[in-house]
Amino acid sequence: MQTALTTRIVDPTAIEEAAERLRAGGLVAFPTETVYGLGADAANPRAVAGIYEAKGRPSFNPLIAHVADLAAARRIARFDSRALTLAEAFWPGPLTLVLPKETNCPVSDLATAGLDTVAIRVPDHPVAHALLAAFGGAVVAPSANISGHVSPTTAAHVKADLDGRIDMILDGGPVEVGVESTIVGCFEHPMLLRPGGLPREAIEQVLGMALTRPPEEPESDASQPLAPGMLASHYAPRTRVRLMVEDVKPGETLLAFGPAALPGIAHARAVMNLSESSDLGEAAANLFGYLRALDAIAVDSGAIGIAVMPVPGHGLGEAINDRLRRAAV
Ligand code: TXA
Ligand code: MG
């Protein structure tokens, strides 16, 4: 395949061309408010297979179907009153709902890994919206990275991983949220399948009830996992990641949060601060880019790994800590 075409979104003809490539079974990376997605026509199993191929992704991982609005989502899945409440409160936005498939659900079985449920979201990003509206149907899109790498928050990250493996990259600049969507399973009791860009507290407030967690997080070999994005090694950088540090060991780089005056910091190979003012939103937006950058520095300079300061667990901190734990596996 030819080298991926990267195009600035200021050009509306790029949206039409991207929609055309999707219709032809191609792969198009596009920005959302959470992370960049690698999109394919959800109804075209060969195109969906191309996603797994390009990412080198284990084929049991089901994908999220992205649509332009709630009306399009209702052609794909059955919404009960709770699901409708959540969709109306938070779409467009960083919330994915796992719902029973509608009869004649157009999303291919390959994309849902044979489950009778489907994950859907309406992204809150002008480029994603324009693309989905121009395309018309559902676009399945995992994060646009090689499987196991950190998720891309800029078009350059996408290019670094997938150049030459996909048809096109729509460049919408850096994303706003920086961690993936929160995934809620709309089961008998709503379940938090993956913490993400929408804080759990906001969802629980709208529902008027607490979300449950899956009984046990699936480990590396679950064949029908509830949310296999929870695979332990999903977000691993190449170098060792040490969490909750209180000092910097010789040869480490530092991922800081808030005021950073740790013993040993003067000897750190590199320091990047997720948010000097301890703002969790800013930290989420910086998370994957900084992990990537520190990982690259560590690999190039022979550093022994990345030391990570503690990040509070409330609000967006729940998702940040979840991703950090996976990076540390
Ligand atoms: O923010 C996001 O959600 C990004 C952007 C591109 O939209 N997408 C993303 O996709 O993070 P991905 O493929 O990296 O993660 C999808 C997650 C996986 O954990 C997968 O297992 C879960 O969604 N999932 C998909 N369908 C499911 C289903 N029917 N039941 C349970 N989990 C499902
Ligand atoms: Mg991913």
Image: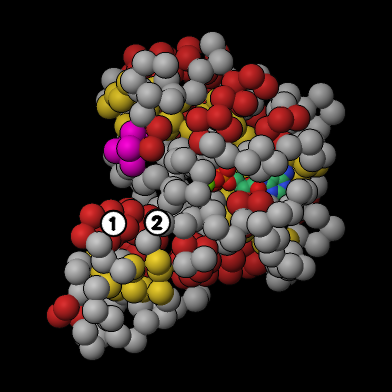
Residue furthest toward the front? Answer: 302
Number of disc labels: 2
Q: Amino acid at mark 1?
A: Val
Mark 1 = which residue? Answer: 299
- Image position, residue 220 (x, y; %): 66, 57
For ligand 2, tell me if the residue under mark 1 lies within 8 Å. Answer: no
Q: Position of residue 95 (x, y in %)?
A: 58, 50
- Residue 157 falls within the magenta-colored stretch: yes
Q: Majority secondary structure of the magenta segment?
A: helix
Q: Is residue 98 left or right of residue 320?
A: right
- For image coordinates 51% across by 18% down, the residue present is 26
Task: Pinpoint residue 110: horizontal percent, then vertical percent.
Answer: 71, 30
* Element type at mark 1: helix
Q: As shown in the figure, which amino acid type bears the numbered disc 2?
A: Arg
Q: Which residues are magenta?
A: 155-160
Residue density around tag 2, few if under 14, some if 14–19, many if 20 or more, within 10 Å: some
Q: Residue at x 58, y 55 (%)?
A: 182
Q: Position of residue 130 (x, y in %)?
A: 44, 26
